[in-house]
Amino acid sequence: MSEKTQKYLAVVRIAFGFLFLWAFVDKVFGLGFATKPEMSVLNGASATAGYLSKGTSGAFAEVFQNLATSAAIEWLFLAGLLLLGIAFLLGVGMRLAVWGGVLFMALLWLTNFPPKNNPILDDHVLYALTILAIGQAKAGDVLGFGARWKNTSLVRSIKILE
């Protein structure tokens, strides 16, 4: 892979990091973009209940609707956004971040399966494929701390943290 392609995918990685981290911050603080201040987590609202109870459709809607009031799902969702955002922004822990990001996108894809405008593809599938490309390109090592991260004794002893 060319250095230019690797740099491009590193920029895309950083953009994903900002996307995940922004979603976390907006949901927690209610900055008025996707989340109104009165619907923020800090004001006692749920980050997942509205979407899971009203925004799901299709074959698996009932499964996700039953999870709408789960505190565990709420905190997993928020922790996922935060950790994915940090990992993608910094380029560290990319092995877990890539698979976590693909899982995150797959679950979001399933919340409205089949997609309304195409029997298979939607933006979540394209995001997942792009995240996989970021991982294949080792884009965390470029414009990030991935190379240094991989050389720490912790990561050398626990390879899954690469």
Image: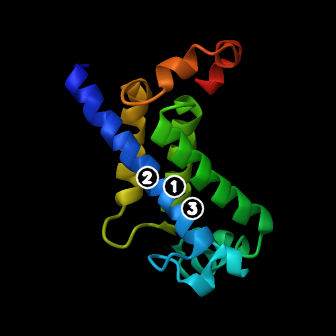
- Residue 134, compared with residue 59, is above or below; it is above
Label 2: how many Cα within 10 Å (few below 14, some 14–19, many 20+): some
Q: Quadrant of residue 92?
A: top right
Q: Residue at x 63, y 26 (%)?
A: 161
Q: Residue at x 55, y 52 (%)?
A: 104
Q: Secondary structure under badge 3? A: helix
The answer to whether 17 appears left or right of 60 in the picture is left
User: At which x and y percent is residue 23?
Assistant: 51, 63
Picture disc at residue 18 = 2
Q: Quadrant of the C terminus?
A: top right
Q: Quadrant of the N terminus?
A: top left
- The residue that mark 1 highlights is 21
User: At which x and y percent is residue 116?
Assistant: 37, 73
* Cα distance in 3D space between marks 3 and 1: 5 Å
- Residue 126, compared with residue 68, is above or below; it is above
Q: Residue at x 39, y 40 (%)?
A: 13
Q: Nearer the viewer, residue 130 or 88?
A: 88
* Cα distance in 3D space between marks 1 and 2: 5 Å
Which kind of residue does numbered mark 1 sit on? Leu
